[in-house]
Image (cartoon, coloured by chain):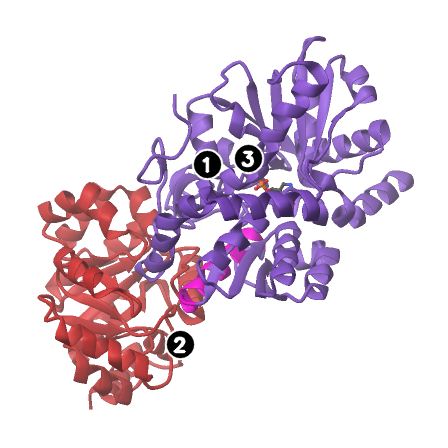
Chain colours: A red, B purple
Amino acid sequence: MLSVYFSAGHPNLKDTATIICSLAKAGADIVEIGMPFSDPVADGPVIQQSSLRALKNGMSVKVLFEQLEDIRQQTQIPIVLMGYLNPVLQYGIDKFCERCKHVGVDGLILPDLPPEIFNQQYRTTFDKYNLCNILLVPPQTSSERILQLDKWSSGFLYIVAASSTTGAKQSFQPYQVEYFKRLENLKLSNPKLIGFGISSRESFDDACNYANGAIIGSAFVKALEANGEITNIVENFIREIKG
Amino acid sequence: MNYHVNEKGFYGGFGGAYIPEMMYQNIEELREKYLDIMNSATFKTEFAQLLRNYVGRPSPLYYAKRMSAHYKTNIYIKREDLNHTGSHKINNTIGQILIARQLGKTRIIAETGAGQHGVATATVCALFGMKCVVYMGSLDVKRQMPNVLRMKMLGADVIPAESGNKTLKDATNEALRDWINNPLDTHYIIGSVVGPHPYPDMVARLQSVISEEIRWQLKEQTGREKPDYVIACVGGGSNAAGAFYHFLEADEVKLVGAEAAGLGVETGETAATLFVGSPGVLHSSLTMLMQTADGQIIEPYSISAGLDYPGIGPQHAYLHKTHRGIYQPVTDKEAVDAAFKLTKLEGIIPALESAHAFALLERIKFKPSDIVVMNLSGRGDKDMQTYIDLMKHEQTK
Ligand SMILES: Cc1ncc(COP(=O)(O)O)c(C=O)c1O
C-alpha cells in the first residue's frame, strides 16, 4: 500500500484536485493532504518550505474545503487530512469534522493533538462524523504504549521510521529494523504504514517488508516543484516507486 | 483561588502538553521526575550552593531613593541584573542542568531571543562539561552580537534560525525540531515559562527564588513581607513568574506585567500578546497567541529581542483572565525613555526588556506609602549598540 503526502496549495493554490486525481489514477492507494501551518515543528525543511509557499499562495482550511467540495465525484481514493492542531481549533473542531464528512474525508492525522487529549475532548465528535484519527508511533516508544496507541488509533497506525522530523533519508539502520520487527511481534490490530524518510523504490520496497505499506512525503513534495504537467510528474513519480 | 498548575498540566483552560508523539518519551520522563528531583536533598543543596557561590545570590533588593522621590512613592529594585551572566535567566539554567544531569542527559539545546538565555545556558554547559547547541533567530544574531560572541567563547554552537521573522519563535521551532531528531541524549533547556507541561511550572519554580528573596529582604528593610506592587516585564514570562510566585495567594499584592507593545498595539507591529491575541496552540501549549482568523501565527515585533514572542506563558494567560495579574502594553519609545531615566536617576543601565517594566512607573498612580518592587531582570550591556544609536539620533535632532 502506498500513501502519498502533499501540501495543499503547493506548488500552486489550485493544484489540489489535480494532484489527488493524478495520484489515484497513477496507482497511489491513499492521499494525505497537508494543511499548511506557519510553524510546523514536526517537519523538516522540504515540508516547511512547501507549507510557507502554500500559505503565501492563500491556502487555508476554509479554501481547502472549498476545493474538496466535489472531489468525491471525481475519485474514491481514501483521503486523509494532516496538519497541526491550531488552524483546526480556530476553524472549530465540530465544524471542521462536519466539513470533513461533507466533502468525503476519511481520516485525520494531527501530530500535535496528543491521544490523551483526543480521547477526552474530541473522540465523540470524530465518531459522530465517522472520521478515523490516525496516531503516530515513533521508534523510542515502549511496547506498552504502542499497544495503547494501537487501541486508540483507527484507520491505520503511522509508523514513524526514524527519530526525526520529516524528510528523506538513506536506507534503514539496524535500530529501525529492530523496531519494525518489534512492531510485527506485537500483533497490532491496525494496519501499519511506515513514514518519514521513505523516498525511493528501494526504501518503499524495504518498508513493505515490515508493514502493510509506506508513506512518501518530502520526496513527492520536492518532485512537484519540477517544471512540467502535474499529471505527468505524478505518473512518473508513482511509476518510479511502484514499478 | 489556585494559580498553580493542576495534575493534568493546566492553569484553568491554559497550558497542557500538546506534543507530537515523538516528544512523548522525553516530556513524560520529565513530567514524572521533575518534582522528585527538585525536592531531593541533593538537588536542593547543590542548587542553593551554586546560586550563592556561582551566581552571586541573593541578588540585592535596592531602595531606589532618587527614583522614589521622583515618583513620590517607595521603589525597591530587585537586582537580577547583578547575577552572573547579567540576568535572571541563569536561575533557570542552573536548575535545569542539574535536572538534565540527573536524567542522564549529556547534550543540551536551547533557544534564545536576546541571547541572555543562550549565554546562561552556554555558561552552565561549560560549568558541567556538557555539549551545548543554541538556536537563535538570524535577526537576533545581528542585533545581539555581543551575546553571540559570548556563547561562542563559552563553547556553544550557535545556529541561526532562518525561518519566519528570524526571531525567538523561529529559534524555538528549530530547538523543538532538534529535540525530535535527538530524543535520547538531549535535554532541551527552555528559557521561559512556555512550552509543554511541565516546563511552565518547572521554570516558575526555579525562578521563584526571586520572590522568596524579596519576601525576607523586604521584611529586613521595611518590616513588611509583602509589597503593594510587584512589577516585571513579560516576554514568555519567567522573570515575572518568579517575582510573582510567593505572592500569588496574597491578594493584597498587585502583580503587574509589562508586555512589549512595539510600535503600539493598534499598529500591528507589536508583541503584546494579551491585547491582540486569542487562545490557541503554539510550541505545545494552549495559551494566548497572536494569530490570524485562520490560526496562522502572526510575526511579532518589539525593539527588545527578549520580548519579541507571539505567545505568553499559560500561567500569565490565566492570571490575566482571572484578573489576578494586571498586564499593560508598553511601546518601544516608552521603554527606551524609561531606560534612560533609570540610568540617569540611579546609575543603572537596564536591559531593554526590563526597561518595559520601568515604563509602567509613569502610568500607575502610587500612594506615598506604597511599597513597589521593580524586578530588574537584566543589565543593558547587550543593548549598548541600540542605546548608542539612540543617543546619536538625539544629538543630530
Ligand atoms: C533581561 C531579560 N528580561 C526579560 C526577558 C524575557 O523573558 P521572560 O519573560 O521569560 O522573563 C529576557 C529574555 O531574553 C531578558 O533577557
User: Which of the image's four quarters has the C terminus of chain A?
Assistant: bottom left
Determine the residue positioned at 55% across, 48% down. B95
Q: CA distance from mark 3 to mark 1?
A: 27 Å
Quick check: B113 above or below B150? Answer: above
| Magenta stretch: helix, strand or loop mostly | helix
Q: Are marks 2 and 3 in contact (CB under 8 Å)?
A: no
Residue B369 at what x, y percent from top left?
Answer: 69, 8
Which amino acid type corresponds to the residue marked 2 in the rendered image? Glu
**Secondary-structure class at tag 1:** loop
Q: Is residue B179 magenta?
A: yes
Give the residue number, with chain letter if any, for mark 2.
Answer: A225
**Total count of labels:** 3
Identify the subunit bearing mark 1.
Answer: B
Q: Is residue B342 magenta?
A: no
Q: Crowdedness of circle 2 by 10 Å Cα count: few (<14), some, many (20+)? A: some
Residue A131: which quarter of the image?
Answer: bottom left
